[in-house]
Amino acid sequence: MTKPQIKSLLLDTRLPRLEVRMLLEHVLDKPRAWLLAHDTDALAPEAAAAYEALALRRIAGEPMAYLLGQREFMGHLFRVTPDVLIPRPDTEVLVETALECVAGVAGPAVLDLGTGSGAIAISIALARRDARVMASDVSAAALAVAAGNAWNLTASVRFVEGSWYEAVPAGEGFDLIVSNPPYVASDDPHLDQGDLRFEPRGALTDGAGGLEDLARIVQGAGSRLKPGGALWMEHGWDQAQAVRDMLAEAGFESVHSRQDLAGIERISGGRKRGG
């Protein structure tokens, strides 16, 4: 049986060329330059079979991040599995804003609620090595992924399991709370489209109108934040006003929203009185 050459697979027209190359790089554990220099090499049957299996999964719509097992975020590579959401560039504005909030605080205490892959908490910890970062999630499987990422990236993060503030030990106070909670309405048709079909449903939707978990986070933040501490949350494209109203009603000051890379109001936050 004739073994296929690498170049024959690089010409696979079933997928975009970039995705074909990325899958081959993953299967062969070789960089692009190596593939180009060895494009006439014969591909071992097991490698060809591994590529074909991944290609078929991609054709079926499975996200590249899950096929490759990783995704870049804030300049760092994070391991991802179907147990966690795939980190997205739009969420980087939440990390950037978080770092601005604690820029003048020595050894800030930071809490990331619903950490998933740990991308937000770990990125903050790596940028502020003096920070005391705690990250929670209700999913033990997600926490295992996050802990592995912290280990691989040498980030100091304390992980706790439980639902929102129930996971946080009593008496803990924070200079900053951040969260990218489930905010998609349960009847949103996007949940059955694209990458979202493969991501954990419980990390995408609160099972209701999309504002339930955001409200819980706002309502519980006051007793967990130090005076002057800040709360920032990611939310849906049409939820900024509703979240700002929640924050204002809860007594937060300097309430405002910030836009993502597409110019959409993606995060909203404010500060607890007294700082």
Image: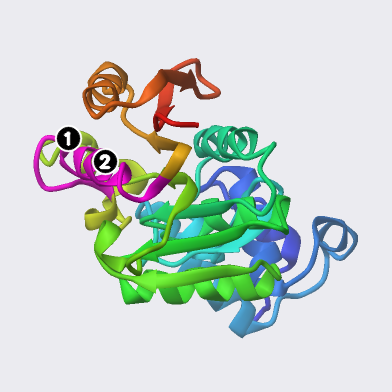
| Residue at the image point whose x is 26% and y is 23% from the top | 239
Quadrant for residue 138, please give it: bottom left
* Residue 207 belongs to the span the image colors magenta: yes
Q: Which residue bears the numbered disc 2?
A: 193
Pointer 1: residues within 10 angstroms few (<14), some, or many (20+)? few
Name the residue type under label 2. Answer: Gln
| Residue at the image point whose x is 31% and y is 56% from the top | 198
Question: Can residue 86 be seen from the camera position used here?
Answer: no
Q: Is residue 65 left or right of residue 142?
A: right
Question: Can residue 261 be seen from the camera position used here?
Answer: yes
* Quarter placement of the N terminus: bottom right
Q: Which residue bears the numbered disc 1?
A: 189
- 114 or 252: nearer the eye? 252
Pointer 2: residues within 10 angstroms few (<14), some, or many (20+)? few
Asked whether the beta carbons under mark 2 and mark 1 sit within 8 Å of each other, the answer is: yes
Q: Which residues are magenta?
A: 204-225
